[in-house]
Image (cartoon, rainbow, N blue to C red):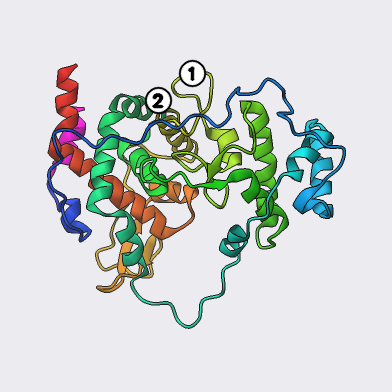
Amino acid sequence: MSALLASCAGEGPRPYEQYGYQRPQAPASRPVMQPPVAQYPGGHSQASPSRGYSSGGLAGTYANYPAVRGFIQDMVRKHGFSESYLNGLFSRANRLDSVIRLESPEPSQGPSKPGSWTRYRNKFLTAQHIENGANFWLENADVLRKASASYGVDQEYIVAIIGVETYFGRNFGKTNIFDSLTTLSFDTHRRSQFFMSELESFLLMAREEDFDPREPEGSWAGAMGYGQFMPSSFRRLAIDFNHDGKRNLWHPHDAIGSVAHYFSKSGWHYNGQVARPSNGERNADGVIELSAYEGNEYWRIFPNFKVIKRYNNSNKYAMAVHQLAQAIKQRVASSGALMRASSAR
């Protein structure tokens, strides 16, 4: 831990100076507590595998959708689901107009406004985000150390992903996942095949993890938990890091381990470079351009930057994660909180 703190306090511009946001005040002696651990949705709450979903035919909103009937038949044939169970489940599905609008936005009119990166960065590189990130790190310090050692992923990037995705668990999303994925699969066109695959993974996940598929809530696009995993990513990469018998991404410990596992499987290099200012290089391989109010920024990116983009394929997203990670790391180092906690043990 002392090596980590030494590296954080080394020479060079402070993150607060380098990225142009205000340095927050020193943390209070008592950190802001993270939100209560969310309960796993519907885990083992009902003995019956059908959970009351049973129907001889398809009714409700999707009663006259041949594509839904075909999807049900595929799930029966490929995965051995009960047809009556799926008929009952989809008979309760709701079409979400808000989700359709979000998936099919109106095309933008006219040229894009400069400063898109500055506006995006200002959503995440705030004093409150940095303070809450430092507190989240302190409250989960042992778990973060374990995840970092197990998977070779730098702790600050695990924390920053959770910060950008859900504000450290304060914003999981309030959209019913089953309704959202059903709407996206059968009422939109641009990515319907992708979302139908995610709906398939979600139903398999619900069966494997033993929860009611109508209970989980998350983002409008179907992402869940602290790390906002899509169902296919959950099935491949979520882990039971606290060994309680459930992969629960609504629990910070499982989420921390799962994000680290995700990064490891995507090729993360421990303590490797992510990005640095390009020092005047433009239009070169490995250099990206970001639109800022003060003039465009040019950054040379490294393999770890591309690993972050496996989470969300956006240069702005990956840069926000990188800069938030560095700011939180600097805040933790300057406060000495982890050093004091380690000495107290």
Q: Residue at x 20, y 52 (%)?
A: 15
Quarter of the figure with the C terminus: top left
Residue 26 on image: x %, y %: 12, 43
Q: SS of the residue at dot 2?
A: helix
Mark 2: amino acid: Ser
**Mark sitting on residue 22:** none
Residue shown at the point (53%, 23%) measured from the top left: 246
Q: Determine whether 191 is above or below 26 in the image.
A: below
- Up/down of 90 relative to 291, above or below: above
Q: Which residue matches tag 1?
A: 244
Residue 217, located in which quarter of the rendered image?
top right
User: With respect to residue 193, does 144 lie above or below?
Assistant: above
Q: For the point 64% across and 32% down, which residue is it?
A: 212
Percent from the top left, x then y, of residue 302? Answer: 37, 51
In this view, the residue farthest toward the top is 345
Across and down, in percent, residue 106 comes to: 57, 73
11 or 343: which is nearer to us? 343
Dominant secondary structure of the residues highlighted in magenta in the image = helix
Q: How many C-alpha atoms fall within 10 Å of the one at disc 1: few (<14), some, or many (≥20)?
A: few
From which residue to which does the magenta span run?
1-10
Q: Most extreme residue toward the right, as rendered?
A: 56
Q: Is residue 164 magenta?
A: no
**Residue 150: image tag:** 2
Q: Is residue 307 left or right of residue 55?
A: left
Callout 1: SS: loop
Residue 211 falls left or right of residue 242: right
Reply yes or no: does residue 6 show up in magenta: yes
Q: Is residue 313 left or right of residue 334?
A: right
Q: Quadrant of the N terminus?
A: top left
Residue at image location 52% in from the left, 49% down from the top: 219
